[in-house]
Image (tube, rainbow, N blue to C red):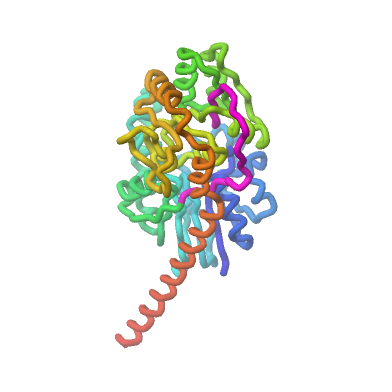
Amino acid sequence: MRIAITYHYSLSFGGSERVLEVLAEMYPQADFFTLFVDPRFLPEKLNSRNINTSFLNRIPGKKRLYRHLLPLYPMAVECLDLSGYDLVISADGAATKGVLTDQEALHLCYCHSPSRSFWDQYAANRSTMPWLARSMFAPVSQYMRMWDYAAAQHIDGFIASSQYVADRIQKYYRRASTVIYPPVATDGAYLAASHEDYYLSVGRLVPSKQVDILIAACNQLPRNLRIAGTGSDEKRLRSLAGPTIEFLGRIDDQALKLDYAKSRALLFAADEDFGLVPVEAQAFGCPVIAYGRGGSLETVVAIKPGAPSGRVSHTSAPTGVFFAEQTPASVIAAILQFESVEDQFNPPEIQRHAHQFDTSVFVSRMHNYVHRQLEKRQVDRVEESALMTAVT
C-alpha cells in the first residue's frame, strides 16, 4: 500500500508537529506533502523522509510572507501530485485536505480545526484590520470558505482533535467526525517531592495566548509567575511585567519538566482547540487554572461544584479550576479559589487523568480507525461489484 501524509507547513513548532512525528512513526513507508518547509522547524522524525513541497516553497522570504499567500493555497495544494497513492492522511490545519487524489484512494483527514481566521473568527479578525486590508480580506475569505467547504466534501472520513473541533466540523462542513485526541508524551513525567511558590505559563508569546492577562493578575495579587516561551509579543509582555514575573525564554525539555513538577499550578488563558500544555502539566501532577472554554473543558476536571467537567474523565478527582472570562479580574478570582482548596488536589490522581491522552492511546485509536475505514472501503467495493454484476 502506498501511503501519503499531507500537512500545511513546517514554519514553526507547535502541537500539530507532534501529531506529524507520531504519524511518521506509525507509517514509516509514507511520503509527505506540504506547502512550505523551513529546515530549521522540520520535526525531527521527518528529517530523513521524502517530503514534497508546493511551488510556493520557492518564494524568497516565505517565513515572513506565508500568511499573505493564502489566496494561492488552493492552487498550490491542487498542484501537489498524489497520483498512485492508496491511502492519504491529511493532518490539516490550513488547506491540504484539498489535495486531489485517485478515485480509488482512501482520503482521511485528521482535522486540527476548520481555519478559524475565515470561519468562526472572521468578524473579529476583520474588525482589527486597516480599512484597505479589510476590503481585501472580505472577498479572499469568501473565496477560501467556498473552496474549503468544497474540499471537505471529498474527504472519506474526518477525525477531530477534540469534541470542540468536531462541533465546528459539523457546523461549517456539515460532516460528522470521530474524536481522537492528539498525542501527549506522558511516559517521561514524574511527581516532585515538594513544590515551590510560583505559578507557570508555557507556550508561544503571541496575542492569542492571552499571557498579558496572566501577568496583570499576578502583578495585582502579587504572585510569582514564571513564563516559558518566546514569540512576537514578548517585548510588549516584558514591558507589562512587575517584579514577581520571570521570563525563562525557550528552555530545554529537562528544565521544562522540572518547572511543571515544582510549580503550584499552570495558568492557561487561551481558547484552544485542544491544548497540549494543560495535559503536559497534569502529567506531572500539576493542577491547571484555565479559561473555561474550548479544549480545556475536555482535558481539565473542574473542582468547583456545578462547573463543566472534563468530557473524557474516568475519575471524579479534580485536576484544576476554570475562570469564566479572559480578564485579569477573572484570573485573580480563579487563583484565589484555587489557593482556598489547594490541599484538595492529589498529584497522583491528576497524573493518572493525564494518561488518558498518552501517545500510545492516540496510536491505538488511529490504527483502529484507519483499519476500519480500509475494511469499509473494501466491503463497499465488493458490494458495488456484486450490484453491477447483478444489473448486467
Along the line of sight, the residue nearer the viewer: 333 or 295 = 333
Q: Is residue 80 visible?
A: no
> What residue is rendered at 55% in x and 30% in y?
202
> What residue is rendered at 64% in x and 29% in y?
250
Return the residue found at the far front. 343
Magenta residues span 181-204
What x and y, as percent, mark residue 78? 48, 54
Along the line of sight, the residue nearer the viewer: 69 or 110 = 110
Residue 193 falls within the magenta-colored stretch: yes
Looking at the image, is 62 positioned above or below residue 314? above
Looking at the rendered image, the quarter that the C terminus falls into is bottom left
Q: Quadrant of residue 137?
A: top left
Looking at the image, is 249 positioned above or below residue 141? above
What x and y, as percent, mark residue 283? 55, 41
Q: Is residue 11 visible?
A: yes
Looking at the image, is 337 positioned above or below residue 241? below
What x and y, as percent, mark residue 186? 58, 45
Residue 280 falls within the magenta-colored stretch: no
Looking at the rendered image, the quarter that the N terminus falls into is bottom right
Q: Is residue 109 left or right of residue 363?
A: left
Magenta residues: mostly which secondary structure? loop
